[in-house]
Image (cartoon, rainbow, N blue to C red):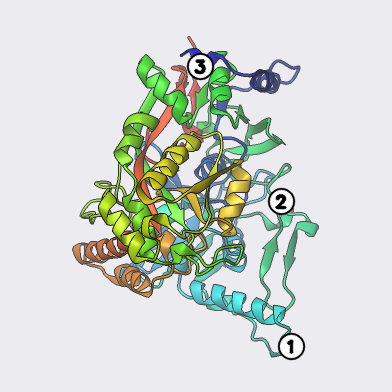
Amino acid sequence: MTRLVLIPLVLLLLLAGALFWSGVTAEKPADLRWINAGDPKTLDPGSMSWGQDIRLASALWEGLYRFDSTSDQPQPGVAQSVDVSSDGCTYTFHLRPGALWSNGDPVVAGDFVFAWKRVLDQPAGYTSLLFYIDGAQEYCQNVQLAQQQLRDGADPSAISQPQFSLVGIHAVDDATLRVQLKHPVPYFLELCSFATFYPLHERSIAPDLISRHPVTGAIEIRQGFAKPPLVTNGPFTLSQWSYKQRIRLLKNPYYWGASEVSLNIIDVISAEDGFAAFQMYETGAVDWIADVNPEVAAKLVRANRDDFHVTTGFGTYYYEFLCDRTLPDGRANPFFDPRVRQAFARAIDKQTIVSNIVLTGEKASDTYIPRGIFANYDSPRGLSYDVPRARQLLEEAGYPGGQGFPKITLLYNTNAGHEAIAQYVRRQWLDHLGVQVALEGVEVKTFGALKEQKKFQICRASWIGDYSDPTTFSDKYLSFSQNNDAGWVNVEYDRLCAAASLEQDVHRRMALLEQAEQLLLDEAPLIPIYNYVNRVLRRPYVKGLQPNPRNQQDFRRLRIEKH
């Protein structure tokens, strides 16, 4: 444990800052102080896609349903009840009479209509989840088409306005929301507990941060709206957000279930560096670390700490290729050729990574969807470690022994243990393929922006499932998915996934999704490396934290019991 206490002066300053923000001032101390995973990228539920953002958002917002960490199943939230038609396509939600916003306004069906329309008008990572709703995908595409036509100089009077009235989202009255699906979706109530489906309080958004396009009618909410003062409808409100220091949450007195909420003040302490986060925990500045740095975690495993918990995760750590024909700088992209991607995938000994680098029980993986997590789903075979075959594939692609291979860079985010893996993989590619790869580590917000803008060649990636169905993984690589950072497009993959969405027989449906994953693995827009575990540090007096594969929590249930 020696390294854990030898932190530089800058980390001690971070610790001092955490102590300052966590109660060593005149302000009231927090009941619970915890570290999420650095500052959120965004607290806008319509655009968030990172797990730590979604984890925090569940304390601020509530959907028609909410995620219950005890049962790992959705439970009624804003909706008091729901009627489902006999064909499984029409959901009629009846809202709770006592569901209120944090300013005391009632939560009405129109708040969901507004928020869901905005997600379709202003696409982000998870917009495609709404495409299960009748007419939603067509409407979203029509909005994008109309906006492109305007950018190209078309006469506004000649552009057909997209018709949101044709989308199956209707506020029957203030207390009733009716949703019409294209086909039955067995996990739709789970989706209704997810951040993308949260409502928004339109009336409280500053006029300079929201607009409606005069031609298309599309809603646009600009960056910066999701900061204090922010009107939310969950168990807590956003009281303060001091960048890279602290987020303070206060109990929402208007929340319909406020009597079940034990905590009054929660401080979320920012700590980008995993060793600094650990020191804050050790000195008592925080009570819980939701995602322990892998290097720290490996040492804690060896120390056999009772307060450190490793549980099964719900995701995969992998590397992702940009699959466009050209690289961001205009050069021809060698990874447009699947043989090159396959060669790189087969040249990595993944077992060494989990045995010698991450060291907290992760399992090496050759599949994108973790094995054994979904009933009736038989994982296909991925690309195994095979250096001779890797060299052959690279030669077939025109780069024998790596000769003539262009200069490429592997992008990763810093301060999360990714550099050690990147260094190892770079050496593997040099030794086995003769290819020299440069490394570029950047802070997490820059990393996320570069990925989203497809300004990379190879990058570190991961995916954590959001609901209990294989499509929570497979949908990411649909050609129209905003989360498809690789830019990989395969018509047959889209067809298989579409066929699966319509198939009502469980076994035939799973077989179609298995074929889709097999195609994904064969084409190799990504290299699966290992399956995640959850690594959590928590004090024994923090009660209500329920281990679950998604590492999400029900903040209503958290409490402090010090005796």
66 or 430: nearer the eye? 430
479 or 134: nearer the eye? 479
Helix, strand or loop at disc 2? loop
Q: Amino acid at mark 2?
A: Phe
Callouts 1 and 3 close, C-beta under 8 Å: no
In the picture, the disc for residue 552 is none
State left or right for residue 135 relative to residue 204.
Answer: left
Residues packed near mark 3 inside 10 Å, few (<14), some (14 to 19) or many (20 plus): few
Residue 295: x and y in percent read 45, 27
From this viewpoint, is residue 316 visible?
A: no
Residue 439: x and y in percent read 54, 44
Q: Residue at x 61, y 63 (%)?
A: 329
Residue 506: x and y in percent read 22, 62
508 or 277: nearer the eye? 277
Q: Residue at x 51, y 16 (%)?
A: 3
Q: Which residue is mark 3?
A: 3
Residues packed near mark 2 inside 10 Å, few (<14), some (14 to 19) or many (20 plus): some
State left or right for residue 335 relative to residue 152.
Answer: left
Q: Amino acid at mark 3?
A: Arg
Q: Which residue is mark 1?
A: 155
